[in-house]
Image (cartoon, rainbow, N blue to C red):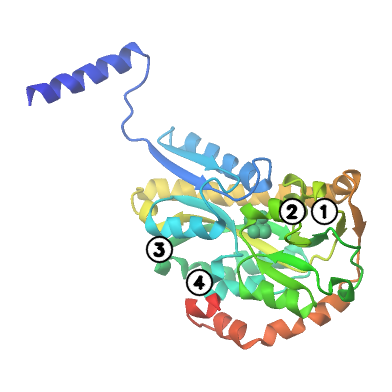
């Protein structure tokens, strides 16, 4: 017992000598993303972390780990369920495997513009879907933005759906994306984002699709010649926290996180819009040949995805297994 007191006193003395304040209550929330440090997710995550640190007087520290350091988007969501990771900012790409109804947001050509996306995501539908998350061990702190997705490839300019024929294209790991690319006549290959640059470089795949902010920050212009502004999916993102971590926070801390997340979401949507306005030209400056195809024939070619039985079942209230086929 005496020995214990002695060690504690020595530790306090050491902290005082070294100028450190003896703060025991600090909570660290690790937040993982899949994208490069300069990407909008990480700018928003840092912004969120700063708000949280300021408003909790430094009691909560958000540590951001970009570039798939903590695993793929799907791995990170599983980490939240297990309690091995506290937070992630992820696209909805893998989310249908956890809450099948999220697939609704993955449908091609669902939204015509950002305003309609925000109305749905921040309104009743977005709230009802997010309310399903705690049942699988995660909580949403808000719908963020990945953005409208465009196609890049190393083979040829894309102007019509026919130009997609036979292209080996990497897609996110969900059947909605696979079905969409099949409907366009391409050969989809589901793959974690962390493996994508190498797959494009080594020509294991010819093509990929992502928002401009991802294409530019990942330097895909180094390995892809053609960029087609198809905007075929609006890709939402979601800021998630592990239910295990959430329950360790006080109601006051939970309120601070919720409010900071709403501000970080608005900030991220602004920088995402700015990225869309600036990065088409920036990709062209890096040597990409950009096409702006008429979207109507693409939308018509993928209409069948909306009536695909596995998709209808998942969105209409099926279980998670429906999402894994
Ligand atoms: O293509 C993907 O997997 C996603 O769009 C990405 C880049 C990980 C961002 O969420």
Q: Position of residue 106 (x, y in %)?
A: 66, 71
Q: Nearer the viewer, mark 2 or mark 4?
A: 2
Residue 224 is marked as 1
The first of marks 3 and 1 along the sequence is: 3
- On the picture, is 205 further left or further right than 229? left
Residue at which label 2 appears: 202
Q: Quadrant of the N terminus?
A: top left
Mark 1 and mark 2 lie on one chain; the one further toward the N terminus is 2
Question: Tag 4 or tag 2, which sits nearer the N-term?
Answer: 4
Q: Real-space Cα distance between discs 2 and 3?
A: 38 Å
Q: Looking at the picture, tell me which residue is in the foreground, 80 or 196.
A: 196
Is 14 above or below relative to 117? above
Disc number placed over residue 137 in the picture, else none = 3
Residue drawn 58% across the image and 68% down it: 126
Ligand 1 - quadrant of the structure image: bottom right
Q: For this view, does 275 lie left or right of residue 69?
A: right
Q: Is residue 129 left or right of residue 22?
A: right
Quadrant in which the C terminus appears: bottom right
């Amino acid at each position: 017992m005496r020995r214990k007191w002695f060690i504690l006193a020595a530790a306090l003395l050491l902290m005082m000598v070294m100028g450190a304040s003896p703060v025991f209550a600090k909570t660290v929330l690790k937040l993982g993303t899949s994208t490069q440090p300069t990407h909008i997710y990480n700018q928003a995550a840092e912004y969120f972390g700063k708000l949280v640190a300021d408003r909790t007087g430094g009691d909560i520290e958000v540590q951001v780990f970009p570039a798939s350091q903590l695993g793929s988007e799907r791995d990170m969501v599983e980490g939240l369920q297990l309690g091995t990771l506290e937070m992630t900012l992820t696209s909805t790409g893998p989310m249908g495997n956890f809450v099948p109804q999220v697939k609704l947001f993955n449908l091609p050509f669902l939204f015509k513009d950002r305003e309609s996306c925000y109305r749905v995501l921040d309104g009743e539908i977005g709230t009802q879907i997010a309310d399903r998350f705690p049942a699988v061990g995660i909580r949403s702190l808000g719908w963020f933005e990945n953005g409208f997705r465009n196609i890049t490839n190393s083979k040829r300019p894309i102007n019509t759906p026919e130009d997609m024929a036979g292209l080996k294209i990497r897609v996110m790991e969900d059947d909605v994306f696979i079905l969409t690319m099949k409907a366009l006549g391409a050969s989809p290959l589901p793959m974690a984002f962390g493996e994508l640059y190498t797959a494009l470089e080594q020509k294991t795949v010819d093509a990929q699709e992502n928002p401009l902010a991802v294409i530019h920050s990942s330097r895909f212009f180094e390995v892809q010649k053609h960029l087609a502004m198809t905007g075929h999916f609006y890709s939402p993102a979601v800021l998630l926290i592990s239910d295990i971590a959430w329950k360790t926070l006080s109601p006051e801390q939970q309120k601070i996180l919720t409010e900071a997340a709403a501000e970080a979401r608005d900030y991220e949507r602004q920088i995402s819009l700015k990225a869309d306005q600036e990065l088409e030209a920036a990709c062209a400056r890096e040597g990409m040949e950009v096409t702006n195809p008429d979207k109507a024939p693409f939308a018509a070619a993928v209409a069948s995805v909306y009536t695909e039985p596995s998709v209808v079942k998942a969105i209409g209230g099926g279980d998670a297994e429906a999402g894994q086929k």
